[in-house]
Image: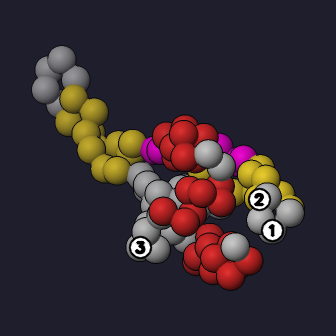
Amino acid sequence: MSKKCELTGVSPLKGNNVSHANNKTKRRFLPNLKKVKFKSEILKRNIRLNVSKSALKTVDFKGGLDKFLRSAKNKNLSNRVKKLKVFIASKS
C-alpha cells in the first residue's frame, strides 16, 4: 500500500528529530491516511480510496466525491481517480 493520498497527492516528507543536545537523526513525517468508502451518486456505486484526513474534510465541504472531482486538478489525482473523473464527467 502506497503512503500517498489518492485525491490530493500528499506523500511522506523527510526531516530530522532534534534532541535537546541538538543531535539530529533522520525521520519521516507520514500523512494521516484513512481507507474511506465514498458514495458516487452519478455512478451509483461505492468507491474505496486511500485518502488523507484533510482531503476527507475537503470532500465533505465541497458536497461529495462527484462535486470534488469536477473541481480537482488532474496533476494531484492518482491514475485510478483520473479514470473515475472521466466517467463522472461523461455521465453528467
At 70% across and 48% down in the image, what residue appears?
35
- Between 28 and 37, the residue placed more toward the observer is 37
Q: Quadrant of residue 20?
A: top left
- Kindly report the distance in space between the C-alpha atoms of the residues bearing marks 2 and 1: 5 Å
Residue labelled with disc 3: 75
Instruction: Using the rendered image of the protein, determine whether residue 56 is visible from the camera's viewpoint.
Output: no
Q: Of the numbered discs in the image, which one, if any, rests on residue 12?
A: none
Mark 3 or mark 2, earlier in chain:
2
Q: Which residues are magenta?
A: 30-36
Residue 25: % across, % down: 27, 39
- Between 13 and 59, the residue placed more toward the observer is 59
For the N terminus, which image quadrant?
Answer: bottom right
Q: Label 2: state its secondary structure.
A: strand
Residue 7: % across, % down: 54, 59
Q: Would you say the residues marked 2 and 1 are in contact, meaning their CB atoms lie under 8 Å apart? A: yes
40 vs 52, left or right, is right
Q: Quadrant of residue 11?
A: bottom left
Residue labelled with disc 2: 40
For the C terminus, which image quadrant?
Answer: bottom right
Residue 75: % across, % down: 41, 73
Please tell me whether residue 86 is drawn above or below residue 37 in the rendered image: below
At 27% across and 44% down in the image, what residue appears?
15
- Kindly report the distance in space between the C-alpha atoms of the residues bearing marks 3 and 1: 23 Å
Residue 68 in magenta stretch:
no
Residue labelled with disc 1: 43
Q: Label 1: state its secondary structure.
A: loop
Instruction: Using the rendered image of the protein, determine whether residue 57 is visible from the camera's viewpoint.
Output: yes
For the residue marked with disc 2, what is the amino acid? Ser
Please tell me whether residue 23 is drawn above or below residue 65 in the rendered image: above
Label 1 environment density (alpha carbons within 10 Å; few <14, some 14–19, many ≥20): some
Q: Label 3: state its secondary structure.
A: loop
